[in-house]
Each structure stands twice: as structure tokens, then as C-alpha cells.
């Protein structure tokens, strides 16, 4: 496994976020659901800035799951359009700040325009060395495990050689350490088929805050909670030696 710890242990090296609550946020304001996603996209950019400022190295956001195709057609179409709008509006800014962008997921179902936009974002930021942002789009944790197995088999990996390490090299996020902190907004308490392989030892943090309202203060709450966690990765915490009296 690729478990990791930040130098001081208080700031996670890799943060993974399920950005839930966009539709409910819009509905509370008597707006169409797509407006919630629009404001949610602006929140993504702010969270990228906050993570950069705090020294996070990897950020992975769940933008569109394999199951989201079940949503109303107009909402799905609107989300695809937001991809194009977001890259047009924010790519130059993010690239200038050293952000590297990667898209993880099954690209076969999206339009050629969306694939081209993703390719542009990845190519333009390929040599950046700042925060590595992964956008999980048309992604599912089960899909990821299956495609990793398929790739390993296609390369001729023998069954007895298919270890955890060997399979990890074929996962969609093979370039990143496993997440230290998983955040889900919107009040739901589940991982929803997100990074099933990679979340094995992540600390889980759930908040009722709807994603468009998730700001710097909310992120700091999650980091403060993370800093209090006792991460043992299956081991046992070593007992501290008693202080010697003078």
C-alpha cells in the first residue's frame, strides 16, 4: 500500500473529496440543480488555493461518478458543459500557479470535445510541480479495480505475481500516494464507490456542510480533526515511557 504521512502529521499529503450537496444547495435557493454545480465548481478552485497554501501535495475530487449517468439528461449535459466552461475559465490561472491537472476515469463515454479539453488541461500543466489535482470523472472504484486487473492480465502478469504492489501500479491513480484524508460534504456518510482500493487506510471525515458552502474555515476543521487522529496503519501504538522524577 502507499500510505503516507505529512512531515508534521497535521496536514495530509493527499486529500480526497466527495463534493456532495450541490443540488440541495441550489434547491434551497429555488434555483435549478445545475446552478449548484456551477457554484460548486468555483468552490473547487477556492479549495485548490487553500490546499496549496497549507502544503497539501495531492488533491483528488469526485466530479462525476460512473453512476451519475442515471441523473436527468439535462443535468448530465449541463455537467459536461461545465467541464468545458471550467477549463476555459480557470486553466490559465491554475497553470500559472504551478498546479498539475490529471483526469482519472473511463473516457470512452464522454464526447470528443470533453476529451480534448481534458487533454489540453493535462498537457498544459504536465511539467508543473505544485499541487497535483486529480479530477475523477466518469470514475468508479470498482471500475478502477477491474481495469487495473485487465491491464495487468494484458501485460502478461501471472496470477502468482499479481500482488498488491503489482496491481497498484495499474490503478488510475498509480502516480499518487494513497489518500490520507477523505472528506465528504453534504451530510451523507458513505464513500459511494470512490477510490475503494486507495482509501484502505484513509481517515474519514464527514460534514453536513453543502459543497458550495465549503470554505477555508471548513477545510481547516477537517485538517484539525485529521491532526487529532492516531494513525497506526494496522500496527499498535507504542506506549510512552513514564517520566522520571527528579
Image: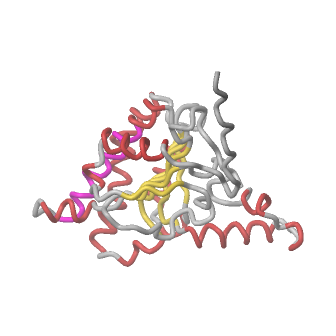
Does residue 15 show up magenta in the picture?
Answer: no
Nearest the eye: 228 or 66: 228
In this view, the residue farthest toward the front is 246
**Horizontal and vertical percent for residue 134?**
52, 49
Q: Nearer the viewer, residue 154 or 117?
A: 154
Q: Which residues are magenta?
A: 32-48
The picture places residue 26, in percent across and down from the top left corner, at 18, 61
Q: Which residue is farthest top?
A: 246
Q: Is residue 221 above or below residue 92?
A: below
Image location of residue 130, percent across then percent down: 54, 32
Q: Is residue 22 visible?
A: yes
Is residue 124 shown to the viewer in this render? no
Give the quarter of the image for residue 157: bottom right
Which residue is found at the position 29% from the left and 52% from the top? Answer: 40
Counting labels gives 0
Along the line of sight, which residue is nearer the eye, 84 or 28? 28
Quarter of the image for residue 52 reads top left
Amino acid at each position: 500500500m502507499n500510505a503516507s504521512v505529512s512531515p508534521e502529521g497535521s496536514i495530509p499529503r493527499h486529500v480526497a473529496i466527495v463534493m456532495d450537496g450541490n443540488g440541495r444547495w441550489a434547491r434551497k435557493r429555488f434555483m435549478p440543480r445545475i446552478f449548484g454545480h456551477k457554484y460548486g465548481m468555483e468552490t473547487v478552485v477556492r479549495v485548490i488555493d487553500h490546499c496549496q497554501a497549507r502544503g497539501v501535495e495531492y488533491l483528488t475530487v469526485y466530479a462525476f461518478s460512473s453512476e451519475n449517468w442515471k441523473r436527468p439528461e439535462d443535468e448530465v449535459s449541463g455537467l459536461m458543459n461545465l467541464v468545458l466552461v471550467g477549463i476555459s475559465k480557470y486553466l490559465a490561472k491554475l497553470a500559472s500557479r504551478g498546479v498539475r491537472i490529471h483526469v482519472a476515469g473511463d473516457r470512452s463515454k464522454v464526447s470528443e470535445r470533453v476529451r480534448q479539453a481534458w487533454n489540453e488541461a493535462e498537457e498544459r500543466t504536465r511539467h508543473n510541480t505544485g499541487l497535483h489535482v486529480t479530477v475523477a470523472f466518469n470514475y468508479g472504484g470498482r471500475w478502477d479495480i477491474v481495469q487495473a486487473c485487465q491491464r495487468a492480465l494484458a501485460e502478461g502478469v501471472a496470477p502468482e505475481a499479481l500482488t498488491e504492489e503489482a496491481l497498484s501500479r495499474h490503478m488510475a491513480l498509480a502516480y499518487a500516494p494513497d489518500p490520507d484524508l477523505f472528506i465528504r460534504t453534504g451530510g451523507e456518510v458513505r464513500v459511494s464507490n470512490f477510490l475503494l482500493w486507495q482509501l484502505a487506510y484513509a481517515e474519514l471525515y464527514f460534514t453536513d456542510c453543502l459543497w458550495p458552502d465549503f470554505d477555508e474555515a471548513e477545510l481547516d476543521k477537517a485538517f484539525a480533526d485529521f491532526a487529532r487522529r492516531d494513525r497506526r496503519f494496522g500496527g499498535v501504538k507504542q506506549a510512552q515511557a513514564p517520566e522520571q522524577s527528579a
